[in-house]
Amino acid sequence: MVRNSEDFLDAGYAAGLVVDGVGTVLGCTPAAEALLGRSAEDLHGLPLRSLLADPDHWPHAMAQRSGPVWEGRAVVRTEDAKELDVAFRVLPLDPPSRPSGRDSRWLVLGAPRAQVSKWRQDFAFTQELFLQDRVGLAVFDRELRLVRTNTHLLPYTGVPADLAGHRLADFLWAEDARQIDDQLLEVLRSGVPLVGVDAFVRTLTDPGAGRIMAVSVFRLQEPDGRVMGVTGLFTDVTEQRRARRRLDLLHRATAVLGNTLSVAETTRDLANVLVPDLADTAVVDLAEGVFRFAEPRPENHRLHLLRRAAAAGPDAGEAGPEDVVELDTGGSLRGHVWADGRPGENQRIRSSMAVLLRARGMLLGRVTVRRTSVLPFDRDDLDLLGEIASRAALVVDNARRYSRERRASVSLQRSLLPPAETETVAVQAASVYLPTDAATGVSGDWFDVIALSSARVALVVGDVVGHGLHATATMGRLRTAVRTLADLDLEPDELLAHLDDLVSQLTVEAGGNEPGAQGSPTPGGYHAFGATCLYMTYDPVTRHCVMASAGHPPPALMTPDGTVEYVDVSPGPPLGVGGLPFEPVEIEVEQGSVFALFTDGLVERGAGDVDEGMQALRERLMRADALRRPLRDVGREVVTGLAPTRLPDDVTLLLARTRVVPPDDSVTWVLDADPAVVASARELVVGQLSSWGLDELAFTTELVASELVTNAIRYAGGPVELRLIRAGTLVCEVSDPSSTQPRMRRARTTEEGGRGLFLIAQLTQRWGSRYTRRGKTIWAEQPLPGPV
């Protein structure tokens, strides 16, 4: 008989021979026939020593005998003359009381020594596997009943001492047991091993916080291939998984919190990253000063006013301006963990913890998280929350400081821009300006609606290269320069040429001619002081429009029939490049048409997408019904639908609906260069004012017209053109072929002339002169009398 479970040399494993007391073979097992390569008939009657490779070694083999049951080694020869090293065991088959002799019987079991060594190694491995307590080992039958387990199947209490015959559901939570059973069944069915799959397990009697087990499963089979069951290895990886999850959460929080410089978005991202990976609910409260982008109280101050900034989770509630709480730190700046209740029938408890948001010696707020589960917060969770909060606090403070500076920049830029809506005789205009979301601050976009002489108007839109206060300051200088040049009534191409000289001068003053200086050219050919600009003038009397572009996108024009096309204007070089001319474009515009001037931030959708953006703008202008709806509403609708959610650049849109001065409100006379026509000019002016019902302006206007016509005939020759325009003001203008500008001076008491322009300046609201392609025009304006 076999002595213990280590006896692999038994009838179940080894080849067997039955011999008598002198070593003659009486019988054998099929395994012996296979091992020796001989049939039972051939083996019957042979002496054992004849089976040895060297029969002379028989005494040596017998010398290994140590008792009635003994083991040894020998080299045997098979039928095909091969030598085989075997390990053997000898067992008596007779009762111990029977004396040994020739009639006694013995059982000799043998197997290749290498195979015996492997059997013993397998047994040692299995034995030690069942004895160790670091890995839970369980053998299941085909019905998933436990057949055998090691001492510590699960690393905490609540598991029965004897698990044989039990199912997992007898001592584990049903959902946990079901998850593992499904995995065991799949391996039992397919035979494909399962390696390292995590499973959460809790016992019925002592659920505690539960444990995370890495489960590996493989199928067991009989030698004939029949399925016996499955074996599962259960490794406790709770701490490793929790540590990994904490590290992943910290990395994810760091990545998320660095994506914005908005206080609101930062706090919202902070709450969302904590739920559900760390807590079921997260609430972020900020100091009152943070909402105003001001300096919060120092962290060593005891009392702080906090207001809800963000929340996440089903029980977090909504943040509102009334959610103001007073925080008493009590001198403690460390976080803390507390439990809100005891386990109930569902074995769940409510655990909370809170940490402060602190940065640069200021208390910015507090983060509070709650969890309703079997796993309460611990010190590691608090440390993790503290680390995340410290990083979030820096981001919040940076966002607060950035928002304060950005708000100052935006306020400065808005103060440099005209009102959002403008009404002139020539156009009705409305604008929309959206500052960029870029971390570098606002850009240098600007627009303007400038009233010119003779009821005309100038529309301008521009964009300074770069962002920040530098771009804003440059924008202010350029806008001022454009207004100054526009007051000279320059043609658009000439105005841009002067503006180009100014930008080039700014670049030189900034040291742009030195390598690496602020004004040095960029790889794209632009300068740090570079800018683009579109300038156009519109005359409501003639419906004549002239425009020129310095590297700026062309305006869109919607005509009264509802079509929208871009004006075919040739864009010259951006301002600051210098040396190249700007080409003017002249068009006639119908009454009620709408111009749309914009900066590239509205139509740029990424690399190569400008054409797509301009097409989208064209379609939106048509859908927004810009011809009939208020332009302010149209602008908001177009920008809201067209501009991207996060603006990489400023967005500016200026809409202008053209007006026309009725033909009856203007009159033009062409006069010969003869002093005799001055009297006729006075009569013509007085007659026209009488027909307009402006008799009270007749004296002043008669004097103005007389002086201007006289000067034109005297110094410029003819022909002379006299025009009156009634459009918001009364305009009297005289054009002549001379390019010499008039100069106002005070005449001496002894001089008979030289007082004409001085008198005009005193009697009118404003006056001036402008160059034309045929000479010059001198004009003077008077306010129209109000209703009586």
Image (cartoon, rainbow, N blue to C red):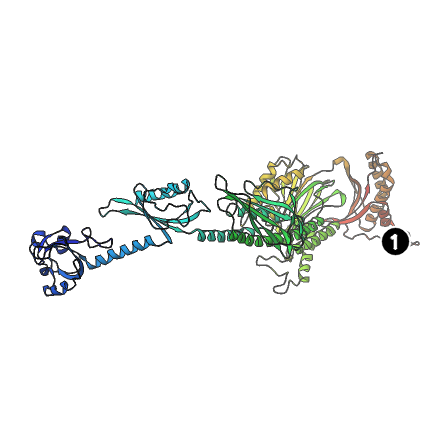
> Of residues 465 and 179, which is closer to you in this image?
179
Which residue is denoted by mark 1 in the rendering? Answer: 746
Amino acid type of disc 1?
Arg
> Of residues 308 and 752, which is closer to you in this image?
308
Task: Classify residue 639 as left or right of residue 351.
Answer: right
Q: Position of residue 371 (x, y in %)?
A: 52, 45
Residue at figure coordinates x 65%, y 38% from the top left:
633
> Of residues 45 and 715, which is closer to you in this image?
45
Task: Classify residue 280 as left or right of residue 441.
Answer: left
Q: Position of residue 752 (x, y in %)?
A: 91, 51
Residue 560 in view, yes or no: yes
Eyeballing the image, is 86 above or below 179?
Answer: below
Residue at figure coordinates x 34%, y 42% from the top left:
166
Residue 82 in view, yes or no: no
Callout 1 crowding tier (Cα within 10 Å): few <14, some 14–19, many ≥20: few
> Of residues 461 and 80, which is closer to you in this image?
80
Q: Position of residue 4 (x, y in %)?
A: 23, 53
Q: Position of residue 141 (x, y in %)?
A: 30, 43
Q: Residue furthest right?
A: 750
Q: Residue furthest front?
A: 97
Residue at figure coordinates x 61%, y 64% from the top left:
516
SS under mark 1: loop
Eyeballing the image, is 161 above or below 83?
Answer: above
The quadrant of the picture occupied by the C terminus is top right
Q: How many marks?
A: 1
Residue at figure coordinates x 40%, y 40% from the top left:
174
Eyeballing the image, is 105 above or below 566?
Answer: below
Task: Classify residue 504 as left or right of residue 379.
Answer: right
